[in-house]
Amino acid sequence: MSKGIFTGNTIKDTNDFATLSELITHLSGLPGIVGIVEYGGRTHTDMTYGGDYDLTVIFEKPPSTNFSGVHFHVAGIPVDCMLLSIADFTASEPATPFHVVHLEGTILYDKDGITAKLLKEIEPIWKKPQVVTESQVAWIRFVCRHILDKLEYRLYDDFMFSKYSLEIVFMYTLETYAQLKDLGEGQPKAWFSYMKEHDERLYAWFHAAYSTSDLKEQFALAKEISEYVAKDVGGMWGEDEALFHLLPEGRFDREEQENFVEILFHKKGDFNRKNTCS
């Protein structure tokens, strides 16, 4: 039997730090490191169990061309450590949307003020107002309806598929809610906290959805949640609506789309000529 291509690709975690603070002190003394930034819900002084610890170590030069982070444990606490360099913070835009978390982070170590300067310089460049494009709007309206359509009359055909699909609805609508509210990337705990304070009804629906195992109840809640989340972008795709998937830079052109539908459904006009419907 094959052992698989990843056999032997395990690296032993050999650290013996008693606290997260000891880790920070150690990292601060290493050559080539110009900054350490923590973010997320846990600080380096918190050694209680539950949840992970997020930090970024900033190097003068990239430490590798093969990796950009490392996961390990300190005294039983999972650590998510990003390994970035000065060059990562001098780019015109973040390498991933998640990188903007550094703007809300806390500097724990800063060699010669380099890190503070980097974060100050990226703030007006990286922290742009959230703009949801027309293409994204169309996709949100489609997806919020699409999975519900799959289950509408087949909820009990395949229990595992139905449970999986409903989980996708809850995850997608939560992420979409965070996107529309500009709540940042990858922080579901913070999203729910915001929701609890600002959208009590939506929070109650999510709470009920995760508290029940009844498929019918979960499906009804999925519809409520999807309708609520999609309401600010025109609502879910309707049964009497032809919804176009726009290109990433595409825009909604009502006349163009209405003419296309007329040609597609009623054979009037020419696909190769714009606005030729009779």
Image (cartoon, grey):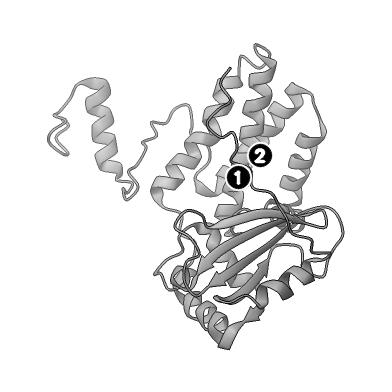
Q: Where is residue 56 in the image (x, y as percent from the top left)?
A: 61, 66
Query: CB atoms at circles 1 and 2 under 8 Å apart?
Result: yes
141 or 239, which is in the foreground?
A: 141
Q: Where is residue 110 in the image (x, y as percent from the top left)?
A: 61, 82
Left or right of 77? Residue 58 is: left
Q: In which quarter of the image is residue 115?
A: bottom right
Q: What residue is shown with label 2?
A: 225
Q: Quadrant of residue 26?
A: bottom right
Q: Residue at x 60, y 20 (%)?
A: 151
* Mark linked to residue 47: none
Q: What is the number of callouts on the image?
A: 2
Q: What residue is shown with label 1?
A: 229
CA distance separating discs 1 and 2? 6 Å
Q: Which residue is drawn at 64% across and 47% down?
A: 11
Q: Residue at x 57, y 57 (%)?
A: 69
236 or 73, which is in the foreground?
A: 73
Residue 227 seen anywhere in this rendered image of the structure: no
